[in-house]
Amino acid sequence: MEIKEIIVVEGKDDTIAIKRAVNADTIETNGSAISEETLRRIQHAQEKRGVIVFTDPDYPGRRIRAIIEEHIPGVKHAFLPKEKCIAENGKGVGIEHASDEDLREALKNVYTPLREKPAKEEITMGDLMDARLIGHPSAKNRRIRLGEILNIGMTNGKQLHKRLMMFQISYEQFIQAVAQIDQEEQNE
């Protein structure tokens, strides 16, 4: 599998894992304190070939993703759920621990956010409350599962609405994913 865009990862181990799974070039952020120089390199890559941000499913990874998104609008995003990124010894989370197959699958399901606001808000904050994704004791676990089903990553309550709109998740996709979560909870 060959990837045209340049993949932004956190470090050398991530680059090794990506190159093992696919034919692609990477830019390493070397931690969550992204330098101005690194942001310029990512901006240049975005202009020339496009960029896919593929960071770890943890707080530093989400922080890096947010910084890049803020400075370089229109980058694409690949996500893996946390349980597919846990080290064999159980100590550590990162895309470098994911299987080649899981990395390829995540890169097939890349999202490109909208550059401008959608004309109509398909999924409202009320829908998120009704689906027990915000303001409910099990909301966090339901958001984690929703992120896995829709391949949009883990979010907090505020980020969820923004990400659903940014990645143009339809109301139908949303309802199907929520129904799947409800079904899974009933079967527990």
Image (cartoon, rainbow, N blue to C red):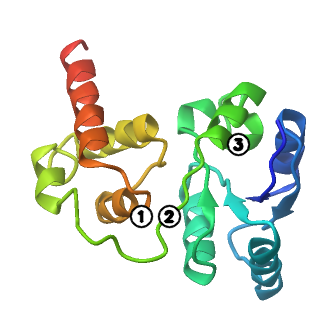
Q: Position of residue 118 (x, y in %)?
A: 33, 70
In front of the other: 38 or 11: 38
Instruction: Name the quadrant containing residue 38.
Output: bottom right
Considering the image in quadrants, where does the C terminus appear?
top left
Which residue is labeled 3 in the image?
95
Q: Is residue 53 left or right of residue 42?
A: left
Residue at far top of view: 187
In front of the other: 100 or 135: 100
Q: Position of residue 90 (x, y in %)?
A: 65, 29
**Callout 3 crowding tier (Cα within 10 Å): few <14, some 14–19, many ≥20:** many
**Secondary structure found at label 2:** loop
Dot 1 amino acid type: Met
**Callout 1 crowding tier (Cα within 10 Å): few <14, some 14–19, many ≥20:** some
Dot 2 amino acid type: Pro
Residues at badges 2 and 1 in contact (C-beta under 8 Å)? yes
Which residue is labeled 1 in the image?
166
Q: Disc 2 versus disc 1: distance between alpha carbons?
A: 5 Å
Which residue is labeled 2 in the image?
113
Dot 3 amino acid type: Ile
**First-in-chain label (2 vs 1):** 2
Q: Disc 1 versus disc 3: distance between alpha carbons?
A: 23 Å
